[in-house]
Image: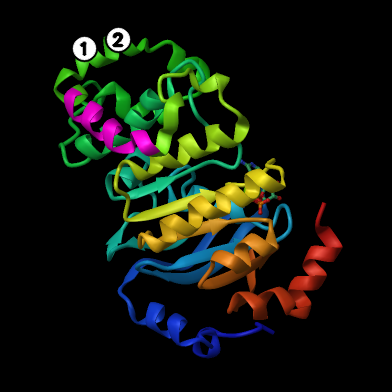
Amino acid sequence: RPAADAGDATSAGARDAVADRPIVLHVEGLAKSFEGLKAVDGISFDLHRGEVLSIIGPNGSGKSTTINLLSGFLKPDAGTIKLEGRSIAGLSAPETSAHGLARTFQNGRVFGSMTVAQNVALGYHKKLTANRPARGLQRIPVLRWIPLLGEAAASLVPWPSVRRENRAVAGHVDAEIERFAERLGPRRDDAAYTLSYANRRRTEIARALVSGPTLLLLDEPTAGMNQSETAEMLHVLQRLKAQGHTILLVEHKIELVTALSDRVLAMDGGRIIAQGDPDEVRRDPQVVEAYLGKRR
Ligand code: ADP
Ligand code: MG
């Protein structure tokens, strides 16, 4: 039994206001199996403009698979995904980002050999190239693909030559980096591998933000962080929320989820077992049992 279905999920007036806003993301019947294992088993939900929706659930419940399906890193077996009314189900990762979706990864992915500013520039380049018609691989600027490649592949693309190839873009990127300089701090010209883990993850979020996304998908942004780093990240996320960003957050730390979210979805075994108000969901007996039974 769900703790609260869509109808009574909005207890506070502020949450009613969120539900009245336009739908940014519409997901219906989304499913993905891996060799018979139903990782995501027919989930449906909506995300409204300016809303922070969190997905909680024990390890293996299908949270990352959901983000991978939404962002084009996996193709769904079935289901509808609409971003601002346009179907994005089955599109590639670069295509979903061209449609306005940006994401971070559970195991933070920044390119260690590049500077902080260069990592962030990758995100801005995506924005600039988003509306260009892609006719064949060679017409798509190299930078747009780098975030999708592994570290090793990225190191094969030396930055100076990329800059030459993308000279028209470079000027804009520098201007945009200046705007982000405050957020990046004094370490903008440091190689990303010299940063603390927490700052690498912040760099990753800056890279996602600089493209001006319609929807931001964050996969466990505080994974592996200590208490003070987690508190700092909470502050960053609260600022993003205050700025009106629409965010789908996958997060294990329930206090963080409660502090940030307008609504929460709890998953177990690929299904949504409860949804609604953060405090109601965290007290739902099925959610408590799923966490106690499986949480590692
Ligand atoms: P969560 O993020 O909630 O911990 P995941 O979405 O990563 O869970 O995984 C859900 C289930 O799907 C798990 O049983 C996991 O082992 C399985 N799974 C995820 N990705 C793959 C994959 N690429 N190949 C096979 N099984 C996978
Ligand atoms: Mg995960």
Residue type at mark 2 is Pro
Q: Is residue 59 magenta?
A: no
Instruction: Name the residue: 40% across, 77% down.
Output: 18
Mark 1 highlights which residue? 164
User: Dot 2 surroundings within 10 Å: few (below 14), some, or many (20 or more)?
Assistant: few
Q: How is the image coloured?
A: rainbow
Q: Is residue 105 above or below residue 169?
A: below
To which quarter of the image does residue 28 belong?
bottom left
Side of 65 relative to 84 (left or right): right
Q: Which region is colored magenta?
A: 171-182
Instruction: Name the residue: 31% across, 30% down.
Output: 144
**Contact between labelled residues 1 and 2, with CB atoms less than 8 Å apart:** yes
Mark 2 highlights which residue? 160
> Quadrant location of the N terminus?
bottom right
Instruction: Name the residue: 33% across, 37% down.
Output: 180
Instruction: Find numbered disc 1 in the image and state the secondary structure of the residue it sits on.
Output: helix
User: How far apart are the two marked residues, 2 and 1, measured between alpha carbons?
Assistant: 6 Å
Residue 91, x across and y down, in percent: 35, 47
